[in-house]
Image (cartoon, helix red, strand yellow):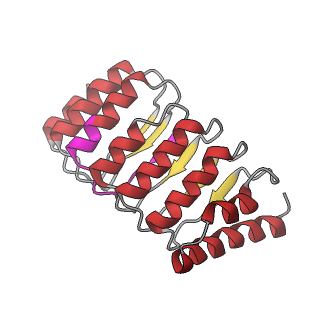
């Protein structure tokens, strides 16, 4: 796809999100025109916009029917657990998305739990800066135990304590694919770090 076409696609997405917020219109039809069946779009970067939960829900609906998108970047968009839940449900249906970037939103433990239940096809997941604590980390750890695709996981700048780190450490012992794990900037002490190191 030419760069001019890509710019038009992203602009259409942003305009559709804004229209959806203003008029509560049928965002799905707008978004389908932007990156639906007619285009071979593989990468959608909407970071640092005002997508919010409304936009996340509508993007999720489009993801359910999209067959080409592999990378979705929704960093810094004010998305909460509600929006993350919609994205998670879409990931369960979508067969092509492998890279998901949701850092610096507000998904919290509830959103992280929903995402954890849907990571079966992801290879890269960024949930940094999302106010995730031990509860969310525990759910992610359980998902890691059975996951066979995830290679990169970023949980930095959250509120994960030693309890969460211990659960993740146990999951790493079982998981065979994860090669990169970022837990920097959390609330992990020497005890938690020791568990990870072991």
Q: Residue at x 58, y 52 (%)?
A: 61
Q: Would residue 122 be visible to someone looking at this image? A: no
Question: Horizontal and vertical percent for residue 72?
Answer: 59, 53
Q: Would residue 120 be visible to someone looking at this image? A: yes
Identify the image quadrant of residue 46: bottom right
Q: Vertical placement of 35 versus 94: above or below?
A: below
Question: Horizontal and vertical percent for residue 55?
Answer: 52, 65
167 left or right of 4 in image: left
Viewport quadrant of the C terminus? top left
Q: Give, as a single range, the part of the protein colored magenta.
A: 124-138
149 left or right of 67 in image: left
Q: Residue furthest bottom?
A: 22
110 left or right of 114 in image: left
In magenta segment, residue 157: no
Q: Which residue is drawn at 41% across and 68% down?
A: 78
Q: Vertical placement of 43 versus 123: above or below?
A: below
37, 149: nearer the viewer = 37
Question: Horizontal and vertical percent for residue 11?
Answer: 70, 73
Q: Vertical placement of 67 versus 49: above or below?
A: above
143 left or right of 149 in image: left
Q: Which residue lies furthest to the right in this view?
A: 2
Identify the image quadrant of residue 70: top right
Q: Which residue is drawn at 21% across and 30% down?
A: 195
Looking at the rendered structure, the number of numbered marks drawn on it comes to: 0
Q: Vertical placement of 188 versus 36: above or below?
A: above
Viewport quadrant of the N terminus? bottom right
């Amino acid at each position: 796809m030419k760069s001019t076409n890509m710019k038009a696609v992203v602009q259409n997405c942003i305009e559709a999100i804004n229209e959806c917020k203003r008029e509560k219109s049928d965002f799905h039809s707008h978004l389908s025109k932007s990156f639906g069946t007619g285009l071979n779009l593989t990468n959608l970067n909407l970071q640092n916009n005002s997508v919010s939960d409304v936009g996340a829900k509508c993007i999720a609906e489009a993801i359910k029917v999209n067959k080409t998108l592999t990378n979705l970047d929704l960093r810094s968009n004010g998305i909460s657990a509600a929006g993350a839940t919609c994205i998670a449900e879409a990931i369960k249906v979508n067969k092509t998305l492998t890279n998901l970037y949701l850092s610096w939103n507000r998904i919290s433990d509830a959103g992280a739990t929903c995402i954890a239940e849907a990571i079966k096809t992801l290879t890269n997941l960024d949930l940094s800066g999302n106010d995730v604590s031990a509860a969310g980390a525990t759910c992610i750890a359980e998902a890691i135990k059975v996951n066979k695709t995830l290679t990169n996981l970023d949980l930095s700048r959250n509120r994960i304590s030693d309890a969460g780190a211990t659960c993740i450490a146990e999951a790493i012992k079982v998981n065979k694919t994860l090669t990169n794990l970022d837990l920097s900037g959390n609330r992990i002490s020497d005890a938690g770090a020791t568990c990870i190191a072991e």
